[in-house]
Amino acid sequence: MKIKVIITGASGMVGEGVLHECLLHPDVEEVLVVGRRTAGVVHTKLKEIIHKDFFDLSPIKDQLKGYNACYFCLGVSSVGMKEKEYHHLTYDLTMHMATILADQNPGMTFCYVSGSGTDSSEHGKLMWARVKGQTENDLMRLPFKAAYMFRPGFMRPTKGLKHTLKGYKFFTWLYPVLRPMFPNFVSTLSELGLAMVNVTLKGYEKPVLEVKDIVKVAQPA
């Protein structure tokens, strides 16, 4: 099986890492990046759509047909935000695109990056975790072939990429120590990208993947 993938958030650290793995993977034959600005990558597999308003995708809707996976890596930090604003930029934006993709591509596998600590009950104390939990729950109700929720923790960045968050350079050297000490929280960005490709190709028994699941699924068969 060869897969055609849509990626969002490719101008950020997580999306860039996932894009990198897709471009390297022999079973990914085409990648469409949809973003507000270019990912800054040139590759024979890659196409881009620059679209400023993710709350109105109607002008590009027809260009989103014909894909069998979406790796949704677009997100914002909740720091300094009120819940209403964060909900709009997280839940509303994600659901708008996902609803269109489910309609256009009923055979699609949708992979969403939320985060370790996401609150599936939607009633916990942490605002961001409630919003992410609601987003996960409602994505799994859409008529996709499959929908997987990825909850990474600390990820070792992929060497050589451009959009690694500045703070990570102060902790990356600790990765060899942190991984055995905190196996439920530490993985690599490369493993996240590979896990997304592998659940598209082979599926997985659980719709919500915590860090240990991500590491497991990333391994070659």
Image: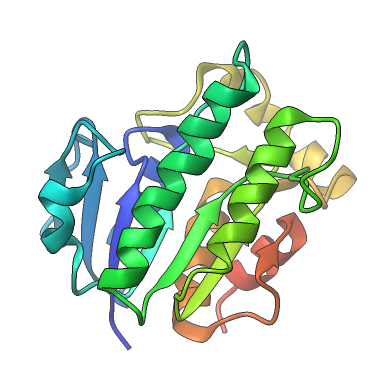
Q: Residue furthest top?
A: 80
Question: How many labels, in total?
Answer: 0
> Taking 112 as reference, is 108 left or right?
left
Q: Residue at x 45, y 66 (%)?
A: 110
Q: How is the image coloured?
A: rainbow
Q: Residue at x 68, y 63 (%)?
A: 209
**Is the residue 1 above or below the residue 121 in the image?**
below
What percent of the width, then of the height, locates residue 77? 56, 24
* Visible residue check, residue 217: yes
**Is the residue 68 above or below the residue 152 in the image?**
below
> Taking 117 as reference, is 25 left or right?
left
What percent of the width, then of the height, locates residue 135? 59, 50
Q: Nearer the viewer, residue 210 or 121?
A: 121
Q: Quadrant of residue 171?
A: top right
Q: Residue at x 65, y 49 (%)?
A: 134
Q: Nearer the viewer, residue 219 or 55?
A: 55
Q: Quadrant of the N terminus?
A: bottom left
Q: Residue furthest right?
A: 181
What percent of the width, then of the height, locates residue 126? 79, 30
**Is the residue 177 above or below the residue 44 in the image?**
above
Q: Nearer the viewer, residue 69 or 63?
A: 63
> Taking 170 as reference, is 66 left or right?
left
Q: Quadrant of residue 219?
A: bottom right
Q: Nearer the viewer, residue 189 or 8?
A: 8
> Taking 48 as reference, is 177 left or right?
right
What percent of the width, then of the height, locates residue 114? 61, 46
Q: Quadrant of the C terminus?
A: bottom right
* Visible residue check, residue 21: no
Q: Residue at x 36, y 82 (%)?
A: 107
